[in-house]
Image (cartoon, rainbow, N blue to C red):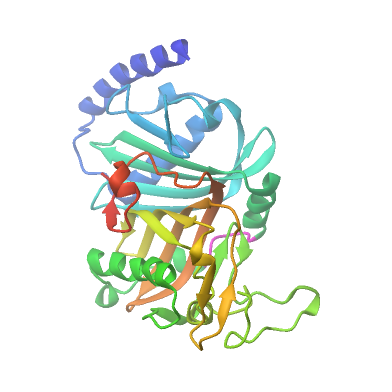
Amino acid sequence: MRIRGVLVLAAWVVLGGVAAAQGGGAACDRECLVGMAEQYLDALVAKTPSKLPLTSPTIKFTENGQRLRLGDGLWNSVSARGTYRIHVADTVQGQVATISTMREAGTPIILVVRLKVENRRIGEVETMVSRSDKGIGATRVEALGQPREAFSRMTPPSDRASRADLVRVANMYFSGMQLNDGKGQYPFADDCDRIENGGRATNAPGRGGAARPDPKTSSNYSGMWTCREQFESGLLHFVSRIRDRRYVAVDQERSLVLAFVFFDHDAGSSRTFQTPDGRTVTAGPVTPWTWQIAELFKVEKGLLHEIEAVLQQVPYGMTSGWSSWEDGMSDKIQFAR
């Protein structure tokens, strides 16, 4: 690691001079941000962090909430790029977030990367590596072929919402799930569909021809239901807290919002609750644990359409490494800083 750190420092000095000579202070547009993300993924596979244009040789870099030196962690074990990729470019804040598949020692994984770009140099790197089910999740993602068309489709200028409204609608998803009494305001479009680690989490076909349960009478939450039916069932009540809600990339042209969040399951009194029709139900995990999640939303005309999530189970109460402890335990809206 000492040699790699020296190389990063040397490259920073050289690349800094090149950037200055080429007018490095210019704004980084969409093409520039996506190019930075692609450059990062290529450098990652080549195991050459020294090739990246950095604002400093000691930029902040985290992997799954843990601060590391750039060049450590997945940089040691990555073996190839995968076939699936979505970029979310935030030209206002100079952020780009990428969901992609990779290979680690030959096994498929899902990687989510956030880069903060300043003066056409990378100033922050935040990564989430999902090694779900020994590659099953990443394999499912690649089986989708290409990302859904909605994630690349431009929203007509007349229909584009403000950044604040895009985040507000996305946050209603988390707030509605956290309260989950089945009586909230749920901004779901009729075509809303959610995919989690490549699997259908809504509108899914029944396994082996299983019948579709009635969301108004079932005591068991079902991935066969629509987005709205799942929330109106009130059966997600055991998600006790949704916190460290950081909205890290907002793309107004495509009406996209990408957030990093944590879903807690406290395994306590939240497991027993009443459904909207008054039935008492006990459900959910019996030991405390947390989902670390990157969630991408397509928001148009005030409604949630396509949703894509990357999840991994982590220790209960874990935070992102980018918030204070108090903010990490809070459900307030936060942004990448």
Q: Residue at x 69, y 51 (%)?
A: 136
Residue 131 falls in image quadrant: top right
Which quadrant of the structure image shows residue 166?
bottom left
- Dominant secondary structure, magenta: loop
Residue at 59% over, 64% down = 284
Q: Residue furthest front?
A: 269
> Total label count?
0
| Residue 97 falls within the magenta-colored stretch | no
Q: Is residue 136 left or right of residue 276?
A: right
Asked whether, in this view, residue 125 is left or right of residue 327, the answer is: right
Please state, as top left, top right, bottom left or bottom right, where the C terminus lies in the image. top left
Residue 273 in the image: above or below residue 69: below
Q: Is residue 310 left or right of residue 324?
A: right
Residue 72, given in percent of the width and then of the height, sits at 49, 25
At 40% from the left and 49% from the top, the residue drawn is 97
Residue at the right extreme, as displayed: 208
Location of residue 67 in the rendering, given as x and y in whole percent from the top left corner: 41, 31
Q: Position of residue 283 (x, y in %)?
A: 60, 68
Percent x, y for residue 38?
45, 41
Residue at 63%, 75% (x, y): give it.
220
| Magenta highlight range | 144-148
Q: Nearer the viewer, residue 13 or 107?
A: 107
Residues 159 and 336: in front is 336
49 over 92 or under it: above or below: above
Which one is in front, 220 or 199? 220
In the picture shown, does residue 194 fall above or below 1? below
Eyeballing the image, is 9 above or below 25? Answer: above
